[in-house]
Amino acid sequence: MEICRLKSPKYYKELICSQKFKKDIDNYRKIVKDIVNGRCNKFILIVGPCSIHNYDEFIDYLDLFTKIKEKYQSKFFFMIRMYIEKSRSTGLWKGYLNDPNLDNSCNIELGIKHTRELFLEATKRKIPIATEILCPLTCKYLDDFVTWSAVGARTCENQTTRIIASDFDYPIGFKNDRKGDIQIPIDGINQSKKSHSYVSINTDGYPCVIKTKGNNNNHIILRGAIGKVNYKEEAVNATNELLLINNIKTKILIDCSHDNCMRYIDSKNCYKNQELVVDDIIRQKQNKNESICGLMIESNINEGCQPINCENKKYGISITDPCISIEETDRIINKLFNSI
């Protein structure tokens, strides 16, 4: 066993300070709370790469995405996908924070530093950050920058993740599990409303017991399942009915990627089907479906994906799930902007 001491969260937060942006981040969080609770009519768009894998390329994507945000922000509340940890059931690359050099050297300290630097660059551009809760400790190194987080399909039933979700002052979206079970994330949302006590680390890096306040702003994300989609009107209405039965009044967010774009049928070109999901949501919104509050879209500089271990990686292309290009992203958002 090899042990490498990691500096405390406080060290990184002081090294790459978010404190001067606290007012902006608090305001972003309030807006998202108002949207998911039905107090604001803006529509959430969470857009960006499946995962970050290259520092300079992501900075380039940030600059391109900033232009899109500026064109359409009168109607939409934009957040950028900054996914830096990947939930893996098959032992693949675990994400930029864990292995920023993509070579299994797992320089986590460098990963934390570079992640916070990228979070700072997004915040400087006034772009709210959306990420995913995975490790209950690493999120303590990042939470000061984050506006919204997801709980993924593989972790929505995990007790520790539900407890962590009760501890944050920002909304968290629970995805349905990979089999399409809706009750599991509903149970997670209700559990995260409650106060819990758990063992973690404080900002100085010392073990402590944390008592949470509970989080009343969490909501469900429909991301499809193996063998079926769940973004269509019948599935959305059924989910909304089940939410109300379980005394959950927050709205629904639709993930246009993953199994909602039929990944299990055509993994090579499935990313192009994200537009089909957007088109269906446009129809639902035009038919006055008020239960849907936003969409997630996987987008990169260039479309498609490539293997992580290829020798000559192409610029701006995902090494995890395939994504649509930034040009397609602009075109689809323009369609959405002019339709709802």
Image: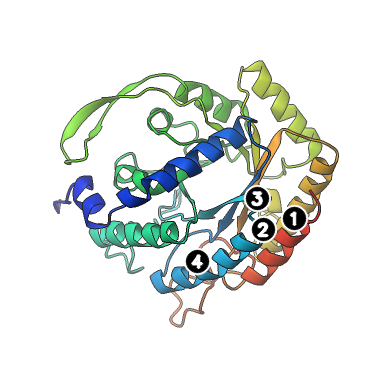
Q: Nearer the viewer, residue 258 or 92?
A: 258
Pick whichever of labels 2 and 4 is earlier in the sequence. 4
Who comes first in sequence, dot 1 or dot 4?
4
* Residue ID at (66%, 55%): 263
Disc 3 marks a residue whose amino acid type is: Phe
Residue type indicated by callout 2: Tyr
Name the disc covering residue 72, or none. Answer: 2
Mark whose residue sits in front, 4 or 3? 3
Look at label 4 and name its amino acid. Leu
Q: Position of residue 45 (x, y in %)?
A: 62, 50
Whether residue 298 appears in this view of the structure is: yes
Which residue is disc 3 drawn over?
A: 76
Pointer 4 or 3: first along the chain: 4
Kindly check if marks 3 and 1 are in contact, taking CB atoms under 8 A apart as contact.
yes
What is the C-alpha distance between the residues marked 4 and 3? 17 Å
Q: Name the residue carrying label 1.
A: 337
